[in-house]
């Protein structure tokens, strides 16, 4: 991704999928800057006409995650994860998705994950996001209660 997205970012995801919903809810809970606007494209009332006019249809959104930045630029697949993880404060995970040598692997792996997300849900993968959120909360709590570092010479 060469151009930084303009926020807020509207993320279209399948909330009928427990895995997708768990991940997006975890990220939104960490979105202190309100940079993410989540849209459930699986909802019966979802109208994809404005998006379809730009070439992104509901079936496309249901098959792969999509996002549109405030400047009108569309992102899909791994590019979305890079941006949403960074916006939610998971900069290390975002950087991992951007590693040049690993990116081809992620670009090939993500479609398989998306195609098998309901199976992965049955295997318990949504718990990973609950654990990730809890680990971040615990680390923040520990950092808040740590005594201040001593200065040298004191």
Image (cartoon, grey):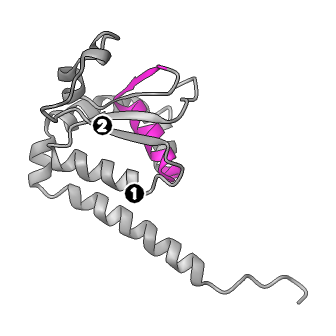
Question: Percent position (x, y) of residue 88?
Answer: 47, 50
Residue that carries the numbered disc 1 in the rendered image = 29
Picture quarter containing residue 16? top left
The one of 10 and 134 positioned closer to us in this rendering: 10
Q: CA distance from mark 2 to mark 1?
A: 15 Å
Q: Residue at x 14, y 48 (%)?
A: 120
Residue that carries the numbered disc 2 in the rendered image = 39
Q: Which quarter of the rendered picture does the C terminus lie within? A: bottom right
Picture layout, residue 29 above or below residue 54: below
**Span of residues in magenta:** 72-92
Picture layout, residue 141 above or below residue 117: below
Q: Secondary structure at mark 1?
A: helix
Q: Residue at x 49, y 36 (%)?
A: 8
N-terminal-most mark, 2 or 1: 1
Q: Residue at x 36, y 62 (%)?
A: 132
Picture quarter containing residue 123? bottom left
Q: Secondary structure at mark 2?
A: strand
| 12 to the left or right of 43 | right
Q: Is residue 5 magenta?
A: no
| 106 to the left or right of 49 | right
Query: Which residue sits furthest right?
Result: 153
Question: Percent position (x, y) of residue 92?
Answer: 51, 51
Question: Percent position (x, y) of residue 21?
Answer: 24, 48
Q: Residues within 10 Å of mark 2 (few under 14, many from 20)?
A: some
Picture layout, residue 53 above or below residue 145: above
Q: Residues within 10 Å of mark 1 (few under 14, many from 20)?
A: few
Question: Percent position (x, y) of residue 28?
Answer: 39, 51
Residue 140 marker: none
């Amino acid at each position: 991704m060469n151009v930084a997205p303009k926020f807020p970012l509207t993320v279209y995801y399948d909330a009928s999928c427990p895995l997708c919903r768990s991940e997006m809810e975890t990220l939104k809970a960490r979105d202190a800057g309100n940079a993410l606007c989540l849209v459930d494209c699986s909802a019966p009332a979802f109208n994809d006409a404005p998006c379809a006019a730009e070439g992104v249809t509901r079936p496309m959104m249901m098959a792969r995650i999509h996002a549109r930045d405030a400047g009108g630029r569309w992102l899909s697949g791994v590019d979305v994860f890079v941006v949403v993880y960074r916006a939610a404060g998971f900069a290390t995970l975002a950087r991992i998705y951007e590693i040049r040598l690993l990116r081809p692997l992620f670009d090939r792996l993500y479609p398989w994950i998306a195609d098998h997300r309901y199976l992965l849900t049955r295997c318990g993968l949504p718990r990973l996001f609950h654990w990730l959120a809890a680990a971040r909360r615990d680390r923040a709590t520990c950092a808040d209660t740590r005594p201040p570092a001593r200065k040298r010479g004191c």
